[in-house]
Amino acid sequence: MSDSASDEDLARLAADLARSLRDLQRELEPGRRRRLRPPSPRELLRFTDEVAIPGAILILETNVRALRLLQRAIRLADPDRSVTGEQDTPVRDRAVQLSQTTVQKLDDVLADVQDAVEGRPTDDEAERVLREARSLRDEIDDRLAAEADSGEPDPDPEADATVPVDVDAELQSIKDDLDDGDGDGNGDSGST
């Protein structure tokens, strides 16, 4: 009796496994791919805050540590070398130039992030999408105002459930929150 019960369990498990494999195969078929959508501004800000900026900081800190280790290794390899000698002037000049370039690139990235937060994207495609979103928002506001003025009931009952969103006000609110969180304590948003 126990052999037939274990055979039934094995048959049931094999059938479940086969069904799961068919489902996975159907999901992986090329014609059944999900459509991608662009990230929302909130998702983009969250990604920038949680991943991009900490990642850039980590890379910069790692590079600084690696350069310090290299500097120590060079000093250990040649302890008689004068630190102010003329032979390391080109190396020092190159290091200063590279650090200035790195700082400039970081400034450019931070300026792009600041522009995106303030609603002034530097990318033409992002600017086009933002204009399109503002146009759609204005169209929705106009329709809602026209319906409110006419006093006619909305033919779409779900339209009453939607709340118009002012994208510019939302972006400004996020910018104000970020400015208040800078840690300077005064909350002055004009000091960028």
Image (spheres, helix red, strand yellow):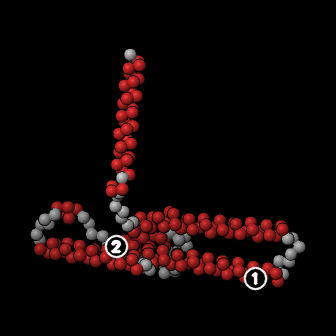
Residue 174 location, quadrant: bottom left
The amino acid type of the residue labelled 1 equals Pro
User: Which residue position is annotated with label 2?
Assistant: 167
Residue 142 seen from this side: yes
Residue position marked by numbered label 1 in the rendering:
90
Q: Secondary structure at mark 1?
A: helix
Q: Which mark is residue 33?
A: none
Q: Is residue 5 above or below residue 75?
A: above
Q: Residue at x 27, y 69 (%)?
A: 164
Q: Residue 74: percent from the left, percent from the top? A: 80, 70
Name the spot of residue 102 as percent of width and height, x first.
Answer: 61, 76
- Foreground residue among 176 and 162: 162
Q: The N terminus lies in which quarter of the figure?
A: top left
Q: Residue at x 50, y 69 (%)?
A: 181
Q: Is residue 185 left or right of residue 87?
A: left
**Is 53 left, or right, of 162 in this rendering?**
right
Say left or right for 150 vs 22: left
